[in-house]
Image (cartoon, coloured by chain):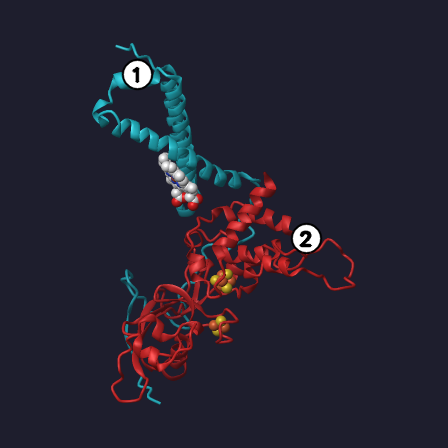
Chain colours: A cyan, B red
Amino acid sequence: MSTETTATGIGPVEGSGAHEGSYGVDNPAPFIEPPRKRTKKTPRSTRGNFEMYGWLFMRLSGIVLVVLVLGHLLIQLVLDGGVSKVGFAFVAGRWASPWWQVWDLAMLWLAMLHGANGLRTIINDYAESVKSRLWLKGLLYTATVWTIVLGTLVIFTFDPNIR
Amino acid sequence: MATPTLDKADAAGTPEPGFADSPYITVTLRVRRFNPEVAAEATWQDFQLEMDPKERVLDALHKIKWDVDGSLTFRRSCAHGICGSDAMRINGKNRLACKTLIKDINPEKPITVEPIKGLTVLKDLVVDMEPFFQAYRDVMPFLITKDTNEPTRERLQSAEDRERFDDTTKCILCAACTSSCPVFWNDGQYFGPAAIVNAHRFIFDSRDEAGEQRLEILNDKDGVWRCRTTFNCTDACPRGIEVTKAIQEVKRALITRRL
Ligand code: HEM
Ligand code: SF4
Ligand code: FES
């Protein structure tokens, strides 16, 4: 049997510069705590069906958003001379109709809640410390509520005669 | 798959060895080594080995351990794809070393071998499987019946009822799926595909009576709803289990029973 075997090419793993050479049997490298081990302190969930409704909402709002967003883009950017037609008068004309008010209101609420819930998922995935999780979510929820309230206010109180 | 033959190895572009009639070629195995008693960082180490391309990556690891460097540490038991001990990342993909033929993974380039991701590396290719098995235990992977009396006869089941969960009975708990899941990499609190597969095994078993409890466990915020349908798990499973489909069936069961 031909077993010519050599061991070469020992080198540091990509990205790791310094190399600790001083570890040994009497001086072992520090023990690495399993980063995501389930411990007694791991919080248990008490949220009922919240995640299920969130999951369902993403899919249902997604289906409705396909119609709302694509229709919105078509009307604003493609039909009737494209984006150059959009101005104060164009917006005023559209919001005179309850149909477009409801359209835009539904789009605002669904897109904001859909996007916020999507970002909540991403924060849950990536934020490692409890503190950064709290801050990021606080920022997200504040921005979401602020945008929804402001947008809703504008849709309902829009005054075409404003000077 | 198909029985490997020399003809096929040649057809697959395996270079002719230097001397006639020898199947051996030189392959480079690039192994990610880690020994916490020596260094805090992992390092790549290359091993040049004379291998028959029809041999498996596990054979190459054996050759290193037995002939070159006895300190190389990895798990394997059955060596035949049954025990689930030797899932590892080979050329960036989770596979069983004992089911991966060298000729199938382009031996012309160095073959990288790493521990599976998302679990703490203890030494070389050995990871701490405890979080993985904790999630497995959490879904109560055993038959539960409400009848507390000793059974007096066999629990019978029709062929169709058995077929319903046949796919998920094949799991060997190798963790290839769970450690290929980006949600598990990012936040290992997620139950992971393997735990859901093994819950599916009992949820859809007509003889079992704790399906509702298991569904409630997986309705957790770290349960099935964290799945993003990435299909990494299905690609990784060495048993060919349709893992993502099983997860989806658990989601559907939850929705239809809760609404
Ligand atoms: C055009 C129609 C849309 C459809 C059909 C749709 C569908 C979906 C679905 C099904 C998910 C869940 C993915 C998963 O859980 O694996 C999702 C996630 C998400 N969506 Fe949408 N969506 C649409 C529009 C939008 C809009 C307008 C926004 C921004 C306001 C948005 C932001 C997000 C974000 C941030 C996520 C989370 C991404 C992730 O989980 O990785 N989507 N979308
Ligand atoms: S489902 Fe497949 S990949 Fe996952 S643990 Fe079971 S056998 Fe391994
Ligand atoms: S050694 Fe048992 S599955 Fe590979």
User: Which residue occupies 51% across, 41% down?
Assistant: A51
Q: In this view, does B189 lie to the left or right of B214?
A: left
User: Where on the image, by quarter, is ligand 1?
Assistant: top left
User: Which residue occupies 35% across, 15% down?
Assistant: A96
Q: How crowded is mark 1: few (under 14 residues within 10 Å), some or many (20 or more)?
A: some
Observer-side mark, 2 or 1, equals 1
**Where on the picture, by quarter, is residue B126?**
bottom left
The amino acid on which the numbered mark 1 sits, given as a three-letter code, is Ala
Label 1: state its secondary structure.
Answer: helix
Tell me residue B216's x, y (percent). 60, 46
Asked whether B189 or B223 is in front, the reply is: B223
Rendered view: A153 above or below B123: above
Q: Is residue B229 left or right of residue A21?
A: right
Tell me residue B203's x, y (percent). 61, 53
Rendered view: A156 above or below B99: above
Asked whether B211 or B72 is in front, the reply is: B211
Q: Mark 2 points at which residue?
A: B209
Q: In this view, does A126 lie to the left or right of B196?
A: left
Tell me residue B184's x, y (percent). 45, 54
Asked whether B32 or B209 is in front, the reply is: B209
Quarter of the image for the C terminus of chain A: give it.
top left
Q: Mark 1 points at which residue?
A: A92
Label 2: state its secondary structure.
Answer: loop
